[in-house]
Image (cartoon, rainbow, N blue to C red):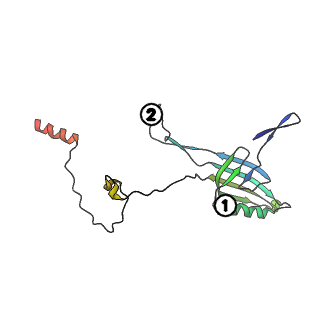
């Protein structure tokens, strides 16, 4: 949002509302949703951590209408919304409150009545796609590892015969203490 002076009076200039480059004639309602997932594990007071909560993808629901015009029919605009949804490629949405990046149309509902035959009313429920970057790397050969059995890359060795499990003698402190107590009595 920006401010402009027009003959001494401030005027608010807002970006035009759009859904992936489609501009509705009328926006009836916008519903914005931002939420956090707050984990159940205890958090120590004063601890410098950030994994006790994470943001869910942003959501916005837009109820709007598009009418036939000299440049495009309502049917063509409806087809463009369907195409935008079918492409499954993230796009931007500009609302009266904010700009949303990397969005997809999750649900698209259209209403046409006898009175609105040359226009259509729709509700587009959109959700953010959280994009990340990843990289792959190649590990050096196993003969260059200090502990290759722990750090070397996984190798394809074909079928391997399962070995029976043989438990190791219990060397825990609890067991040693229990054995020492038996010797005393």
Q: Which residue is more in the foreground, 21 or 179? A: 21
Residue positioned 34% across, 55% down in the render: 144
Quadrant in which the N terminus is drawn: top right
Secondary structure under tag 1 reads helix
Residue 33 can be seen in this image: yes
Answer with left or right where residue 168 lies relative to residue 31.
left
Secondary structure under tag 2 reads loop
Residue annotated with mark 2: 44
Answer with left or right where residue 161 lies relative to residue 141.
left
Q: Which residue is more in the foreground, 90 or 55? A: 90
Where is residue 85 shown, x and y percent of the image? 66, 61
Counting other residues with Cα less than 10 Å from the Cα at mark 1, is it few (<14), some (14-19), or many (20 or more)? many
Quadrant in which the C terminus is drawn: top left
Q: Which residue is more in the foreground, 78 or 172? A: 172
- Height in image: 116 above or below 30? below
Where is residue 48 shown, x and y percent of the image? 48, 35
Residue annotated with mark 1: 85
In terms of sequence position, does the residue under pointer 2 or pointer 1 come before the other? 2
Residue positioned 31% across, 53% down in the render: 147
- The residues tagged by marks 2 and 1 sit, at their Cα atoms, a distance apart of 44 Å
Answer with left or right where residue 102 lies relative to residue 150.
right
Residue 185 can be seen in this image: no
């Amino acid at each position: 949002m920006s401010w402009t002076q027009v003959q001494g009076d401030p005027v608010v200039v807002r970006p035009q509302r759009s859904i992936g480059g489609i501009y509705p004639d009328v926006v009836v309602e916008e519903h914005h949703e931002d939420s956090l997932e707050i984990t159940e594990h205890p958090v120590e007071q004063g601890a410098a951590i950030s994994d006790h909560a994470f943001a869910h993808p942003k959501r916005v629901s837009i109820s709007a209408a598009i009418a036939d015009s000299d440049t495009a029919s309502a049917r063509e605009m409806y087809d463009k919304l369907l195409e935008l949804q079918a492409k499954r490629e993230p796009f931007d949405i500009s609302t009266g409150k904010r700009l949303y990046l990397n969005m997809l149309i999750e649900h698209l509902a259209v209403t046409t009545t006898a009175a609105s035959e040359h226009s259509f009313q729709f509700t587009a429920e959109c959700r953010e796609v959280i994009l990340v970057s990843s990289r792959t790397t190649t590990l050096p050969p196993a003969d260059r590892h200090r502990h290759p059995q722990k750090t070397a890359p996984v190798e394809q060795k074909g079928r391997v015969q399962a070995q029976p499990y043989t438990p190791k003698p219990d060397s825990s402190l609890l067991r040693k203490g229990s054995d020492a107590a038996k010797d005393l009595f």
